[in-house]
Structures are given as C-alpha cells and as structure tokens.
Amino acid sequence: MVSAHSTGIVQFFSVLYRKMCSSASVLLPPVGVRGMKVLDREKFSRNIQVPILKVTEKNLSKVITLCKTYFLKVENFKPVQSCQDASFKKCIFFNPEKINDWTDISEDDRTALSNLGIDKSNFDIQEVQLLYENFKYDTIFKAVLPEQEEIVSGFSQIGHIIHLNLKEHLLDYRQFIGQVLLDKVKTCHTVVNKSNTIDNTYRNFSMEVIAGAENFLVTVKENGCKFKFDFSKVYWNPRLSKEHERILSFLKPGDVLFDAFCGVGPFSLPAVKCKCKVYANDLNPDSVLWLNHNAKFNCVDPNLFKSYNLDGNDFINKIFKEYLIEYCKGNETLRESAKIHITMNLPAMAVEFLSNFNGLIKDKELLDKLDKEILIYVYCFVVGDDPVTISKEMVNKNIGCEVTTNIVDVFDVRNVSPKKEMMRVTLKLTADILFGVNSDNDEPPIKKKCTDKDN
C-alpha cells in the first residue's frame, strides 16, 4: 500500500509550468543532450571543477554549520566527504555557481572560519564527475526538452502510477519522459499519458503506458481509509484530497450523506467511519464494484452504508426521495441536531441534476414534517472572470427557481486551466424547493441526462 502523502500523490502538487531557460548552468547536463528522445544515460556524464574546503576533525561540526549555505547539492552526492589529502579529515564541496574563490564566502563567514583555524590555505579546486544519477528529473527535462516551451504540464501520482497529460509538443518525447520519471521517482513503477479527455459515460479515459509495467491496480490512502481500484476503469483525482477532507469536516456523527456520484468512495467511506449513514451511488459498475470492495476492506459498518449503481437522476428521484418521504412519515429517525448532506461531484454537469430537487415531493401534507437542514454540495466548472457569480447563475438556472438566498457558500476548489475553475456551491435545500412551493411545475423532472463528463 502506498500513502497519498508519502508517495507525493500530489506531486502535482509539483506542477512544473516552467519556461525553458536558454542560458546554460554549470551544473546542468551537457548541451549535447538537447532533443534526446531515447534515454542515453551515458551522455549525462560530465566533469566540473568544484571548489572545496579541506578541514581537520577539530571543530568539524561548527565548520559544516557555517558552510551549509554553500553546499553543492545534487542528487546522490554527499557535500561532505572523506578527504583524499591525508593531512585533512574531510572535504566540503561548494556549489560552483555560488563559490569560485575564497573571497566569494561572505566576510562574516570567513571571519568565523578563521576563528576556527580555517583560512584561504584550506580552499582548493577539485574535479568532480557528475552522472545521470546526480540530476533530478526537472533538471534533465530542462536540458533535453525543447527550449522556450513548457517542460511538463504537470503530473499526479496515484499509488505506483504517475499520470501525465502531455502537451502536443512533448508527445514525441513521451517515452523519454516516462523512463526518466520511472528512474527518478522511487515509488513509481508505471507511467501513463492520458490519451483523450474524459468524455465517456464512466469518467475514465484511455491511457498509454509510456514506461514501466502495465499494472493499473493501485492502492492509495486518504482520510483514514485505504482505497484499492483499477485506475484504468474508474475515476480518481488526487488533487481533490483536500476537498474531500473539507466536506468530511462538515459531517457529524448521526448525519446522513447522499453521495450521488461517489466513484470508489472518497467521500462516502470516510463518512461512514465518522458514524454517518451513507447512501452512495455511481453509474459506473466498476466504481461500485471497488466501492463495495473498499467498504469491506475498511471494515465499515454495513448498517450505515448502502450502495447503488444508478443514473444520478434515478438516485435522486428514487433513493433520496423515498428516504425523505419515509422520514416525514416517521419511518426514518434522526437525532435532533442531525443534518442531511448531498455531494454532487461531477463538475462538468452536476448542476444539470439540480432540476430534480425542484418539486421532488408532491404530497403537500408532508411539508410540515420536513424539519431537518439539507445541504447540497454541487461542483461545477466555470470559465470566466467572475467564477463566484457565474456559479450562482448556473445553480439558479438549473434548479429552475431563484435560490440565491439559499446559497450558503461558493468555494474555489482548484484551478483547472487558465480562466477555468472548479467551484463548489453549498446550497440549503429547503422544504419550499422540495415541495415546489415556488414552482409552477406539476411534475418533477424525470428526463435522463448523459452522465459523467469530467476533466
């Protein structure tokens, strides 16, 4: 099992939107590797002249502390090593981009070193061979990939899989990029590039394995639960880990959660562990298969968890509706302060499902029986300069009545691309909306919508 935090699942959390730098750095690999499409590790070997400070064992720890800011810091290289000169104990290797001469050391540090018996006579130059193993992947990409272009648009790590979405100008380099990442990210065993946008029914996408083993079965840990799934068949976005955590912080023991587009359960299963009653639904049968597997894997209370493989409209019009009716009739009980929560994490089109809630219940005699606060967390993609206002307009338009005063919060979850944001609107679902008090509609909407288009 690989932890989301320990593996840097959110490596994307290391997005590399960097421009190539045309000026050569002394520590970069040779210019001769530019344009390499098949990895040749031998070509990254180069010799550089490195300033060193030769020191005895006396006051060694103090000397090292004074010199830390000048260390030569590259992968798999120790800046403090045994000295070849038998008269000294250690050699301290300086970064040649910072230090070329004794006087490049700050005056204060030179004075402090002098007080420890270290002076210009201890300073020397030594040739060091740097190899492929000494360079980080971003340094390698900067030296090899096209100049004045974005290096890598970003990547995520899901268990042992690194997931890329390469720009067109990098596609010819994909095998090279994949192999470098496989070499440099120790917890990575498979590198994939997304082949198309998420535009099918089940929110998964075609992937090309560009390095490593064709193994899509992963295990990740998030919010106290372990999730196992086939990444090629279900949707998982590690960039949403913090958002999952935020929603879970709103839930209290005894609350009820309806997770309309649950995937493999990042909202649902931690909620059950928090003693909430959960109704989890997804249209993708593979998602539901892994959802149920993970429910058992995490030993969730079966009395607090039910799963469904339904269209989102059917889930609202049947499962959610029946629950509310049974509650109003006294057949479902909740503690006095309990709330009902609905998560709708399908940002490309979740707002379109809001119309189901307007006039969902026809029996007006039950109106006064609905005494619980109901909160919807609906996600949407917004393009424009005012995402908060646009999000509110989308909610009002799709639910079919004016609900601006019912909007509790509009939160910017993450930036998807320039001027495209993923937003979360928190909406208080009142009895007036559910019973269609302010609506002219006699029937709740039942038209099915094509589901699961996410990016």
Image (spheres, helix red, strand yellow):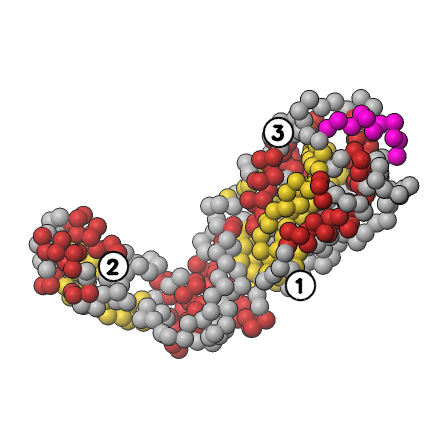
Label 3: few (<14), some (14–19) or many (≥20) C-alpha neighbours in 10 Å: some
Instruction: Tell me, for residue 70, which label it has, or none.
Output: 2
Query: For the magenta stretch, what is the residue range?
Result: 362-372
User: Is 78 in front, or is 115?
Assistant: 115
Closer to the camera: disc 1 or disc 3?
A: 3
Q: Which residue type does callout 3 highlight?
A: Lys
Residue 265 visible (yes or no)? no
**Residue occupying image coordinates x 59% and y 42%:** 244
Find residue 302 and report its image quarter. Answer: top right
Residue topped by disc 1 = 196
Q: Which residue type does callout 1 highlight?
A: Asn
Residue topped by disc 3 = 252
Q: Which residue type does callout 2 highlight?
A: Tyr
- Residue extending furthest right? 442
Q: Is residue 144 left or right of residue 262?
A: left
Q: Give the mark, 1 or 2, whose residue is nearer the N terminus.
A: 2
- Measuring from the top left, give residue 96's x and y in whole percent: 26, 67
- Is residue 419 inside the magenta stretch? no
Closer to the camera: disc 2 or disc 3?
A: 3
